Structure formats: structure tokens, C-alpha cells
Image (cartoon, rainbow, N blue to C red):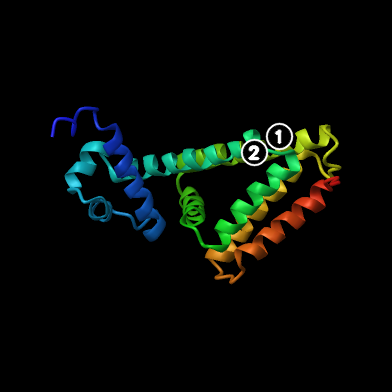
Amino acid sequence: MPNRTAAPGTDRRAELLAAVVRVIARRGYADTRFQDVADEAGVAVGTLQHHFGTRRRMLLEALQTWIDETDAQVEVLRTGQGDPWERLQVLLVYLGTRLGERVDSWRMWLDFLGAALRDPELRGSGRRSNLRWITAIADVMREGAEAGVFDPVLPPEEAADVLGALFDGIALQVYALDSDASGSELVDRLIHTAEALLRPRTA
């Protein structure tokens, strides 16, 4: 087993954090314990304590890792193929489908927001993540307006705020209120809202 401990646990730590994220998605932030994660990862509780120290630090690090990974997906807006409207639609299809399929990442986000109500450190992480997300959307909207692709009814920052609020509101309906909307229905709702805000000038 020469390589098992060779790199000071970087890969192992990532595996443990992934296990924490899976447990939080199933059980929620408040109900995730060391033992739950230990069972999920197939390790002893002492292993988790060695890596993270406290339960709070383990949960905070896992949530921050998950937020960073989710934020990275926003880069599709900046680097994807097509004009701004095409890129925005790709993202809306992706997000709407994941909402309709009840993907755990959206459940994680809602649970994160709930926990952030009582935790200033989580609120700070959530605010920074939301700002990055809204800024990325606004940048694409601004690019489209400057290129003549959009004829927006609101400034880009305000339109991006509306879409961001819509995502969170739909997520609440799906996960907290048991909406039976399908992915295709949610995609249509998101795209129609974006069309009303941006008035894309399609050929």
C-alpha cells in the first residue's frame, strides 16, 4: 500500500467531503452527524474528527466545496458556444430539467439557505455564491443587449435578480410544496420569463 498515504490526504479529504454532501442532501444540514457520514464513507468517526475537527467545520467545508463546484457550472454562461440568448437557454434547460427531476443539488441549496438563516458564516457564503451567479447572468444579458441580441425591459442586473428569485421560488414549490411540475414544464416557464425580460431578437 505504498501510495495510500503518499499525498497528505488530498484525494481522501475530497472523498470524505463528497460523502458529507451526499448525507446532507438526504438528511439535511441540521440532522447530519459524524456517524451518518462515517457510515456513508465507510470510515471511523475518528477519521472524520482527524480531518475536520468538529462537526460544524466538517459541514461548513462540505457546503463550501459544494457551492464552489456549483458556481463553476455558471462558467458555461461565459464560455459556451453560441450567442448570448443560445447560451442562456442552454443553462435554463439544464437548470429546469434538474429541478423537474428533483436533483439533490437543488435540495442542498434550499437546505443551505435554511441553515444560513441561523448561521452568519453560511449567510456570507450564500451571499457570495448568489452574487457570482447573478453577476454571471447579468454579464451575458449585458453582452446580448450590447450586441443587439436582446431588447431588455429591465437593466441586466435587475433582470438577473428576477431570474435568480424565480429559480429559488420554483425550487421551493418543487421540494417544499410537492409541486408535480415536470422538467419540461419548468424549462418552458423559465424560458418564457427570460423572453419577457430580454425580448430576444431571433432571426
Question: Residue 24: x, y in percent?
Answer: 38, 54
Q: Quadrant of residue 13?
A: top left
Question: Residue 146: x, y in percent?
Answer: 82, 32
Question: Residue 35: x, y in percent?
Answer: 23, 54
CB-based contact (under 8 Å), mark 1 and mark 2: yes
Q: Quadrant of residue 145?
A: top right
- For the N terminus, give its image quadrant: top left
Residue under pointer 1: 139
Using residue 38 as the reference point, say whether residue 96 is left or right of it.
right
Give the numbered dot on residue 115.
Answer: none
Q: Quadrant of residue 188?
A: bottom right
Q: Residue at x 34, y 43 (%)?
A: 17
Whether residue 143 is visible here, answered yes or no, is yes
Residue under pointer 2: 77
Choose between 165 and 82: the one closer to the eye. 82
Who comes first in sequence, dot 1 or dot 2? 2
Whether residue 120 is visible here, answered yes or no, is no
The residue most toward the left is 1
Q: How many marks?
A: 2
Using residue 88 as the reference point, say whether residue 53 is left or right of it.
left
Q: Residue at x 14, y 30 (%)?
A: 2
Q: Amino acid at mark 1?
A: Asp
Q: CA distance from mark 1 to mark 2?
A: 9 Å
Question: Residue 104: x, y in percent?
Answer: 46, 56
The residue most toward the top is 7
Q: Amino acid at mark 2?
A: Leu
Callout 1: helix, strand or loop? Answer: helix
Q: Residue at x 72, y 37 (%)?
A: 140
Q: Residue at x 23, y 55 (%)?
A: 39
